[in-house]
């Protein structure tokens, strides 16, 4: 994952797909531990989660639901020209299917990802999402 030439938007899209869209939970959890910093603070509307809570959410959602990305549009990004870290704003639409009932829910979100270089690697350090 992650090549030096990837834009922040491309990096964020790839990480999002690995965490939520692809089917291998082991791959998702490996990416979570390698690409999401333990200092993560995530906000979804008024709810605030730390790394451990986010990790639990990822694991639980993957056990009971299947997610499908319909759109992922980078609205704006700022990248530090030297470090190659920065901030990216995204508009996304996706569907969540409950694996037990088969019921599908459509979601629209606007997300800001903060990405920092930690030990030479890009890591997600903060995320704010409005659903």
Image (cartoon, rainbow, N blue to C red):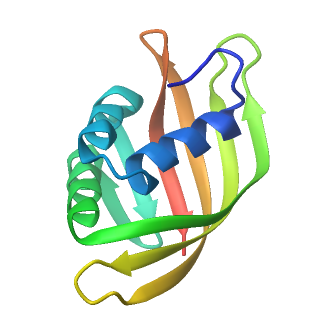
Could you say which is closer to the camera, residue 101 or residue 3?
A: 101
Q: Is residue 60 above or below residue 117?
A: below
Q: Is residue 121 above or below residue 67?
A: above
Residue 49 in percent (x, y) is at 31, 57
Where residue 44 sits, quadrant-wise, is bottom left
Q: In this view, does 80 lie above or below 18?
A: above
Could you say which is closer to the camera, residue 17 or residue 111?
A: 17
Report the residue at 36% width, 31% height from top.
37
30 left or right, relative to 130:
left
Residue 72 in percent (x, y) is at 68, 58
Report the residue at 29% width, 53% height from top.
54
23 left or right, relative to 53:
right
Residue 81 in percent (x, y) is at 77, 16
121 left or right, relative to 91:
left
Could you say which is closer to the camera, residue 67 or residue 124?
A: 67
Report the residue at 37% width, 90% height from top.
103
Residue 76 in percent (x, y) is at 79, 47
């Amino acid at each position: 994952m992650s090549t030096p030439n990837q834009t922040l938007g491309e990096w964020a899209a790839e990480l999002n797909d690995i965490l939520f869209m692809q089917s291998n939970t082991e791959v998702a959890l490996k990416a979570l531990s390698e690409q999401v910093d333990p200092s993560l603070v995530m906000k979804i509307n008024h709810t605030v989660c730390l790394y451990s809570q986010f990790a639990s959410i990822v694991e639980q959602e993957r056990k009971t639901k299947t997610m499908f990305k319909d759109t992922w549009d980078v609205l704006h990004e700022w990248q530090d020209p030297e470090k190659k870290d920065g901030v990216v704003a995204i508009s996304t639409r996706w569907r969540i299917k409950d694996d037990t009932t088969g019921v599908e829910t459509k979601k629209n979100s606007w997300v800001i990802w903060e990405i920092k270089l930690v030990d030479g690697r890009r890591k997600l350090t903060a995320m704010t999402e409005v659903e």
